[in-house]
Each structure stands twice: as structure tokens, then as C-alpha cells.
């Protein structure tokens, strides 16, 4: 009797495992021939959307396009914003996202790939305020307005780094740096990667010459938390591409700082 009971139990476990694998995003992507990637299109030079053509360019876009090519499928970029980035993964709106900062809050709901890039946070101001703001402490004052975009890690950092300042949180498609340009905020914070692109585009802005950047953070792709089959595939792909110099070459192309 024990043997007879054990056999159905073992078969049940195999059936459950097979069903779980069959439900993997990897199988869905291969069967449909389409990889759906959530991207915000507002993070230069990672992901940038051209409103006229609705086309995307950037480091992230190149990464995802290469992944789709290696999978042998088409790619579909799904527009999203920072506050819904995670929910888009958990609801199945897209199979993964492009680059996102690794954070414990996001990891409660979604899975992450292994990291392939890292960044740090710096503050930006108008160049005309260079004598007023020279380090982090100069921004943490009651008469200073610091902007952040809703749903980004910078929203949390602004509150943590500047508890004494006024926080101006804007919702996409508005962006925090636009508040600085318009004079509605004194400063905002962003990655060193985007900061360098912003000051190139807007010479009236400058990076505060802080003693050191804050919050060094690895970035990775967001994936369905329970889908280990898909996570394993993506991690294997990242390891192979890293070994072959793909990410290093792409970093040079987009002039990313490490």
C-alpha cells in the first residue's frame, strides 16, 4: 500500500513541475514569437522614446533587442511609467522590464535578473545656483525644494537624503529635472548616467560637485518573481554576454560611466 501511494504522489509532483514549466514566460515567448518588454522611454541614455515615430533608442533598447534576437523572436516595447513598472511585470502586461535599480521594495513583488551595470546618485541644479549648492548638506534645508518623479527610487532617496527640505513629487510624463529648469524646484537627483546626458542637453544645468555620489546601486531586469525557468534563462544569457564583452561594448557606445 505504501508503494502504491508513493507512486501517485511522485507522479503528481512531476505533473505540477511540468505544469509550472509550461506556464513559464519563456515558453510563452517562444510559442508566440514575441518578447514583450516594459520600458519608460524617459531615461537618457537607457531608454528614449521619440514621440513623433514612437520608436525607442538607448542602451536598454539595444540590450533587449539583442536578447530577442538570441531568442529568435520579435520584440515589442510596451510603454509604462515608473509607478507601474513592477505591476506591469506582476500582472503579465510584459514579460520583463529593461534596466531598473535593484531595491528591496521592488524585490518584494518582482524578481530580478543578475546585475550587469551599476550607477550612483548625484544632485543637479541650475548653474546660476553654483555658489548656493556645493555639497549634499546645502540641499537639506527648509528653504530648498528638491524634486523627484513618482515611483522612482529617487523619490525615496529625496526623502531620505533631504528630510529637512521641501519635496516636490511629480508624476510622469512630467519629470523632476523639468521642475528645476522651470524654476519650480531648486534641485533634483538622478543617476550619474542620466546626469551627464542632462547637462550636455541643458547647459544651464550642472551637477553639484559633491564630495562623493550617494547610493551606489546595481541595476538589472525585473522579471516575474516565481518564474525561475525564465529567470534562469535570462541570467544565463547575461553571463554569456558579459563573458563575450557585449555589455562592455555597449557601455562604450552609449558613453556610460562605471
Image (cartoon, rainbow, N blue to C red):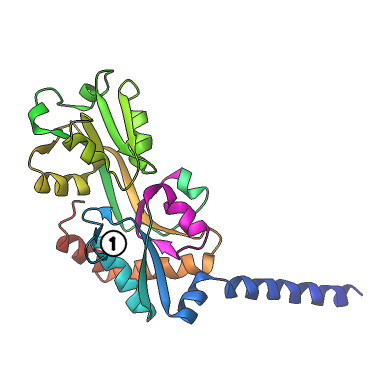
Q: Residues within 10 Å of mark 1 (few under 14, many from 20)?
A: many
Q: Is residue 111 visible?
A: no
- Which of 13/129 is in front? 129
Q: Quadrant of residue 233?
A: bottom left
Q: Residue at x 26, y 26 (%)?
A: 145
* Residue at the image position 59 percent from the left and 75 percent from the top: 22
- Give the number of callouts: 1
Could you tell whether 27 is left or right of 134 in the image?
right
**Image quarter in which the N terminus is found:** bottom right
Residue ranking furthest to the right: 1
Is 102 magenta? The answer is: yes
The picture places residue 2, in percent across and down from the top left corner, at 89, 72
183 is higher (above) or lower (below) than 41? above
Residue 118 image point, x, y percent: 29, 51
Q: Secondary structure at mark 1?
A: helix
Whole-percent x, y for residue 60 in the image: 28, 61
Residue 108 vs residue 202, the one in the foreground: 202
- Give the side of residue 41 with respect to residue 90, left or right: left
User: Does 141 appear above or below 62?
Assistant: above
Which residue position is annotated with label 1?
Answer: 60
Q: Residue at x 70, y 75 (%)?
A: 15
- Answer whether residue 1 is visible to the viewer in this image: yes
Viewed as shown, does residue 190 lie left or right of 219?
Answer: left
User: Whole-percent x and y of residue 154?
Assistant: 33, 39
| In the image, residue 246 lies in the stretch drawn in magenta | no
Boundaries of the magenta span: 81-104
| Residue found farthest to the top | 142
Q: Residue at x 51, y 76 (%)?
A: 27
Q: Camera-side residue: 177 or 64?
A: 177
Amino acid at each position: 500500500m505504501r508503494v502504491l501511494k508513493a507512486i501517485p504522489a511522485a507522479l503528481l509532483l512531476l505533473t505540477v513541475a511540468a505544469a509550472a514549466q509550461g506556464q513559464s514566460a519563456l515558453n510563452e515567448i517562444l510559442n508566440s514569437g514575441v518578447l514583450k518588454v516594459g520600458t519608460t522611454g524617459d531615461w537618457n541614455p537607457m531608454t528614449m522614446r521619440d514621440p513623433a515615430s514612437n520608436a525607442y533608442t538607448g542602451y536598454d533598447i539595444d540590450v533587449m533587442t539583442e536578447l530577442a534576437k538570441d531568442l529568435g523572436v520579435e520584440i515589442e516595447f510596451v510603454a509604462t511609467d515608473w509607478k507601474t513598472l513592477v505591476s506591469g511585470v506582476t500582472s503579465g502586461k510584459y514579460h520583463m522590464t529593461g534596466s531598473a535599480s535593484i531595491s528591496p521594495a521592488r524585490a518584494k513583488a518582482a524578481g530580478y535578473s543578475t546585475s550587469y551595470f551599476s550607477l550612483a546618485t548625484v544632485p543637479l541644479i541650475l548653474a546660476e545656483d553654483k555658489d548656493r549648492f556645493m555639497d549634499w548638506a546645502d540641499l537639506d534645508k527648509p528653504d530648498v525644494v528638491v524634486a523627484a518623479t513618482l515611483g522612482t527610487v529617487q523619490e525615496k532617496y529625496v526623502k531620505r537624503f533631504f528630510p529637512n527640505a521641501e519635496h516636490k513629487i511629480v508624476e510622469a510624463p512630467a519629470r523632476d529635472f523639468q521642475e528645476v529648469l522651470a524654476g519650480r524646484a531648486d534641485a533634483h537627483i538622478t543617476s550619474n548616467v542620466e546626469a551627464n546626458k542632462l547637462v550636455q542637453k541643458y547647459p544651464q544645468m550642472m551637477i553639484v560637485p559633491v564630495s562623493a555620489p550617494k547610493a551606489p546601486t546595481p541595476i538589472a531586469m525585473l522579471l516575474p518573481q516565481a518564474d525561475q525557468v525564465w529567470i534562469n534563462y535570462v541570467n544565463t544569457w547575461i553571463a554569456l554576454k558579459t563573458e563575450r564583452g557585449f555589455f562592455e561594448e555597449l557601455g562604450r557606445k552609449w558613453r556610460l560611466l562605471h
